[in-house]
Image (cartoon, grey):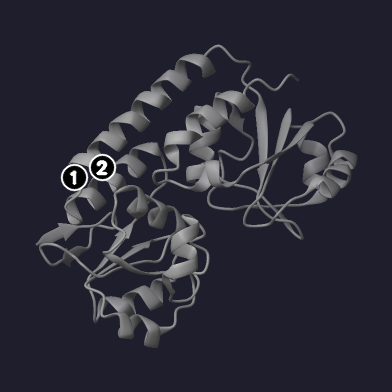
Amino acid sequence: MTFIDQTNSTVEIPETPLRIISLVPSQTELLHYLGLEKEVVGITKFCVHPTEWFKNKTRVGGTKQYHFDRIEALHPNLIIANKEENDKDQILELAQKYPVWVSDVKNLTDACQMIESVGAITRTGEQAGKLAEKIKTNFSQLNLVAAGRPRLRVLYLIWQKPYMTVGGDTFISDMIERAGWTNCYADQTRYPVVTEGELKKLKPDLILLSSEPFPFKEKHITTIASLCPTAVIKLVDGEYFSWYGSRLLQTSEYLRNLGSIKI
């Protein structure tokens, strides 16, 4: 069958792919939700959910560097990747030998389209469609709650040394906006570096310290508080802000609860 992926590339995929490799943690979790236990033969070392797959499935490397010999040994007839999370050159190399379907997810709409597309490709369209509709419903309900909240200026940090945040064209920024807040760096793209001097001048209402990719801990709050003494600072689970597969079923409730923060 012929499919168009989210990068507008044409991909020829077997009618029912029976040997799937996932190179993206959030999409691996989605494949598990869709019941593709037997079909998924390979994952990355960062695909920690579900636990049983992390323990038992063949790990073909990380999200940027792959063991091509392990991939070849698995004889995949479908590889599922992502434009941002995976290395472009290596994905192009894999695409010369295998069908590679690439997602490009910048917001909730893209995520739901990805879920429905993966369902169509893997013959789990009905279940994927129900999942996407439930996610949309949950976020619609969140929108009603968020509309009544103070529009807090939020700085979301993903890295230390240097500090890095998220621009307005990222999935994380879309989640911030859907929580009813304003991303302080919405007018920038990708992942801007933030200097300590900029932090002092920024004066955000709320600073969110992500658990990934840099694992911020309680000890980091004191340092950042010295730079932004008026901000409320919270540790957050980065999976709820950046995982765009079936995890989105839980994300709206997580954001709803975070929104109860008093400033």
Q: Quadrant of residue 249?
A: top left
Q: Residues within 10 Å of mark 2 (few under 14, many from 20)?
A: many
Q: Secondary structure at mark 2?
A: helix
Give x and y (percent) for residue 1: 9, 62
Give the residue at x 51% y 69%: 45
Q: Residue 251, can we see it?
A: yes
Give the residue at x 48% y 61%: 47
Give x and y (percent) for residue 152: 66, 24
Give the residue at x 60% y 25%: 257
Query: Taking 185 as reference, is 83 left or right?
Result: left
Give x and y (percent) for residue 15: 10, 63
Q: Kindly identify which residue carries mark 2.
A: 128
Q: CA distance from mark 1 to mark 2?
A: 5 Å
Q: Amino acid at mark 1?
A: Gly
Query: Taking 212 as reference, is 109 left or right?
Result: left
Task: Relative to 24, say whether 120 is above or below.
Answer: above
Give the residue at x 44% y 53%: 26
Q: Nearer the viewer, residue 196 or 111?
A: 111
Q: Kindly identify which residue carries mark 1.
A: 125
